[in-house]
Amino acid sequence: MSKEIKKLARHSIIYGIGSSLGAAGSFLLIPLYTHALTTEDYGAVELLYRLCSVLMIVMFLGVRQAYIRFFFDKRGDAVWQETVTGSTMVFVAISCAAILALFFPFEGLILEKLLSGHVTDTILLLALFWIPCEMFLNVGLTYFQIQMRSLVYVLINVLFVVLYLAANAVLVYWMRLGVKGVFLAQIGVTGSIAIGVIIYIAATTRLRVSLEIIKKMIIFGLPLLPASFFMYLINNADRYFLGIYSGLQEVGVYALAAKLGTVGTMFLMDPFLKVWSPFLFDNYDKPDGPVLLSRVLTLFTLACVLVALGVSVFAPIVLPYVTGKQFAGAFALVPLASLAAVFYSISGLVDAGILIAKKTQYKPIIFGIAAAVSVAANVALVPIFGMWGAAVAAVASMITLVMVNLHYSNRFYRLPIEWRRLALVFVGAIGTYVLCDVIFIWSNHSVLGQIGSVLAMVSFPLLLWWGKFFTLEELKVIRGGGWKQGWREADAAVTAK
């Protein structure tokens, strides 16, 4: 077990370095955007990105997920894997052209109804032309991901972050092109890197294509299309309802809070999920597979909660220094946004049984239930409570997503969930945050109060220690010098059980 976990950790750390640079890039864009864009501009950018996301869901038809799954059907067969890769690239090209051609006639309606006339048709066209660039880059990065070529993956992402920051500094901040500058930067940087990645993959795989493989991948992926649409509703219903009931200004403030709330967990989730699928399919059928996967789920949850706690505590301290005054109200929503992001991260692991059994037909049911909760909660809460209602609706929908996912997944592959340890993580984190917030408010937001609230975070690991969260093997590892021995004894304990 130790060998597999160390391999997973090694690749996760490499991906984590890339994600940390990406998170740093996103953080650096916050002061740039909040000083160069109005809240209405920021809201328009957010809604345009959401529109592009739903179009990409339709264009992929679930084939990206199928690409990862089919790639491992014949391990070690280079011709098969090259054919799966080439077939995916060709499918994406055809799908992009077809969907964009069908979408263009509705351009005026989108500008009027969704964006309230705030952006021009030129900006919408730029956003649409960015979509194929993003999709081809996405497939290219997936190619490196499933081959566990984490270093190449990270280098490409580092290049993207550097170029994108520079492009935004010139186009958005210096030239003051506003929303138009955001998407000009996206097209220029994403398109350039995507072309290079496509050329490399075409040269190494010879772009072998099989219509039979494309057909099978579509059959596998089609059930994921409605599931992806429902996931889109889960992630975006709050923005749309805020736009309807409160306007683009409130969408902009809420979007900033959501970005801050998710940046920490995405820093963990993004690199981890890139190695999770290969790790899952390599280990699920081993004798200790279920116990191994359950342990990984617990430790991953702990890491996500710890980061979310840190983001929630630091948000009211840091935000006033990096954003314009019109975004000052965002920090209060960060804890709820962080909690929703934690459950979203967990949902990416608890569907293991569905992926293993290839029972993707259950995905629309799972995501449909969570989407229904999201829409109902937003309809009930946003008109009355505004951004707070949207934040609560997000948490409710993500918790629903995790529990329903786990219910159906366990029909095919049961994970021995460590419920006591998980409950201790969440209770300890909530208690720690309340203590930090009380100190911060009691001190009237003074510097001493800020320092005290940060220092109070140490109560979280102490609560875990007091609640006997850590196993004996994990304690040996924590105390140092016991990595090999600790994992060896953990393996022996699992074998004995």
Image: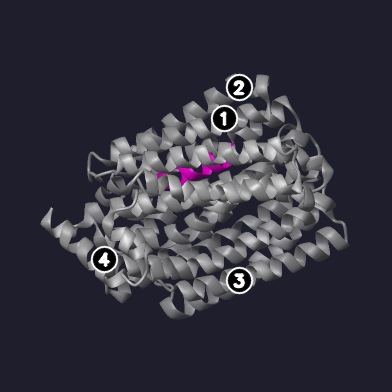
Q: Closer to the camera, 124 or 106?
A: 124
Q: Which residue is mark 1?
A: 392
Does the magenta stretch mainly form a helix, a strand or a loop? helix
* Label number found at residue 483: none
Q: Is residue 477 magenta?
A: no
For the N terminus, the quadrant is bottom left
Task: Identify the residue at horizontal 46%, vertical 68% (top origin).
Answer: 13
Q: Amino acid at mark 4?
A: Trp
Q: Amino acid at mark 3?
A: Val
Q: Is residue 339 magenta?
A: yes
Is 371 situated above or below 354?
Answer: above
* Residues at circles 1 and 2 in contact by the CB criterion of under 8 Å: yes
The residue tagged with tag 3: helix, strand or loop? helix
Q: Earlier along the polypeptide chain: callout 4 or callout 1?
A: 1
Magenta span of residues: 336-347
* Label number found at residue 381: 2
Label 3 neighbour load within 10 Å: few <14, some 14-19, many 20+ = some
Mark 3 or 4: in front is 4
